[in-house]
Amino acid sequence: ELPGFSVQVNLSAAEIKRLADRIIAKSKETYDAVAAVPLDKVNFANAIAPLAELDAQQFPLVQACVLPRMVSPSEDICRASAEAEKRLDSHFLLCRQREDVYRVVKAFTERGERIGPEATRFVQYLVREFERNGAKLTQTKKKEMEKLKSLIDDLNLKYIQNMNDFTKFLLLSEEELAGMPLEFLKDLEETDGKRKVLLTGYYVTPILEHCKVGSTRKQIAVAYGQKGGNQNVAILEKLVQIRHRLARLLGYSNYSDFAIEPRMPMTSRKVLEFLEEMSEQLSDLANRELTVLKELKMKEEGDAQFGMEDLLYYMKRGEQHKVDLDIGEIKRYFPVKLVISGMLKMFQDLFALRFEEIKDVEVWHDTVRLFSVWDASSSDLLGYFFLDIFSREGKYDHTCVVALQNGCMCSNGSRKVPVAVLLSQCPKEFDGNSALLRFPEVVRIFHEFSHVVHHISNRATFSRFSSLRLEGDFAEIPSLLLENWCYESISLKMMSGFYQDITKSVSTEACQSLKRRRDMFAGLKLKQEILLCLVDQIIHTSENVDIDELIKDLHPKVILGIPLLEGTSPASCFPRIAVGYDAVCYSYIWSERCLLLIYSRRNLKTTC
């Protein structure tokens, strides 16, 4: 009953199925109507507007079917959601392959009707999407494409499911965990005199950063690097083969060229050149950084080979030498609830917004909160967002934002307001005390909430141009820009408070240290990202690649002679390559480079 809000949440398995049926029926009806328009009678009102209106009305309904598989605690609902998503994907592919509708849209482009720039862009997107989804293919090839898309969807689901089902843990003694903060050890369940360490990022990263025992770091890194196992490597290799078949079907030489064509670089060759150039430019800096780390290891462990399991630990050691900062102590200043409330206040002040929590609403879990967003000066309703930030079994494992409704104009003159959900896996309260966040987790949540605010601030006329659906190589720039506030004293003090006395915020000196620490070992950090981006590009430009062998060969070349950790398989636990960012993992680094160019030009103008 909320104004401008048509998102349906907390649906049962049966309701999800019925909703998917209605979406498919309405979509077919609209496409049939457009296809029936005589080519000599085509105009914006009968050919383009119905498709724009369909997108506006059905996007929140589709998301209502899809979201539950990421968040619902019910296995039946998750299963129904996954099945609905598969059916809807298959149906929409068929819609975008309809040559009769494509002919009507193309006929409109040839008439030269005067429309606004956003409408013109929408028509261009329609034409491109029809062509990229095979509207010009023969019927036989369309059926083959549908089969390939279905196989890709199935394999994507299996890859993620394997990661979500990974429940392995290690039992380690306190001696093996030497160097770990006491509060970390208290969080670990005790079993047979040892500590149970779950192999999730929340527990693995602190051990790799702080554990003094090299053999423990190696044991943890190897076990975590097998997440997904050989099964996921086989799935990824199969995915790559099917994607290449799909690209060839559409007339592209490889899948990477297909994926990159509508983006800024336009070709896979340009992306490979960009990544190789970045890697080369970073080599001198990264080599100097690695020399520092090797010297630190020599002092602490003697003449032992430097491995990937040592990287995070000695980065922390190096930071401690250069920056007076106790990361374990800093964590005590970031209770989850205080971080969230401070972050909300920060964004309200920065963008002149007002957030109001809406109580007593039916949602998918009792820890989920819903907020409305208002323009502080005009009191106009701008949108809504959900916060689903606490960990629970079966929930999607990464911090991310999902758009539930796009802001856009409807044919009746009303406006749908944007709605989004922020998902994370923050630790829950314990004995009434708010759990504590490590600083990188604070930055990650802040970054993702920036996407929420960007989404809600959007004023697009067409649903297709709502902010989370904008150009891929630009999508990260607003959040990367806003993320810088996490390193400013004024905002850090708003988001912090000592867990035993929240009136005591993090000190100015600590804020300055966090800012200095951010840029330390930047070369080595970016080199690791470039390695995975190169793997992503190479496998998607070649049809048959042994991915494990490729990484084993490429790893020492990019990471300055450090070999891949024996027994690990990064391809088994890198979901960006498998799902969502296939062949476009480079985009994040590209966005950072674009942001640097914006900064440099701004500074140049200021100087001039």
Image: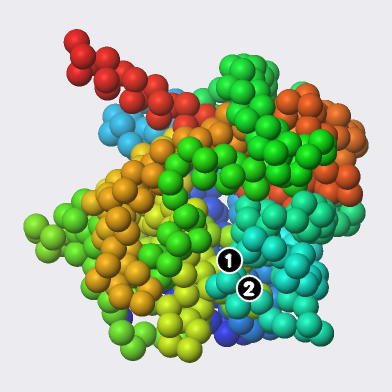
Q: In screen coordinates, is 226 left or right of 73?
A: right
Answer with the quarter of the image where residue 177 lies: bottom right
> At 47% across and 55% down in the image, what residue appears?
326
Closer to us: 110 or 527: 527
Q: Disc 1, disc 2: CB below 8 Å?
A: yes
Look at the image and tell me in which quarter the N terminus lies: bottom left
Answer with the quarter of the image where residue 174 lies: bottom right
Q: Amino acid at mark 2?
A: Leu
Name above or below for residue 479 compared with residue 369: above
Q: In screen coordinates, is 375 left or right of 385?
A: left
Evaluate whether residue 261 shows in this view. Answer: no
The picture places residue 179, in percent across and down from the top left corner, at 65, 60
- Per the image, the residue denoted by label 1 is 181
- Per the image, the residue denoted by label 2 is 185
Name above or below for residue 368 compared with residue 267: below
Closer to us: 292 or 169: 292
Q: CA distance from mark 1 to mark 2?
A: 7 Å
> At 32% across and 59% down in the image, what residue appears?
506
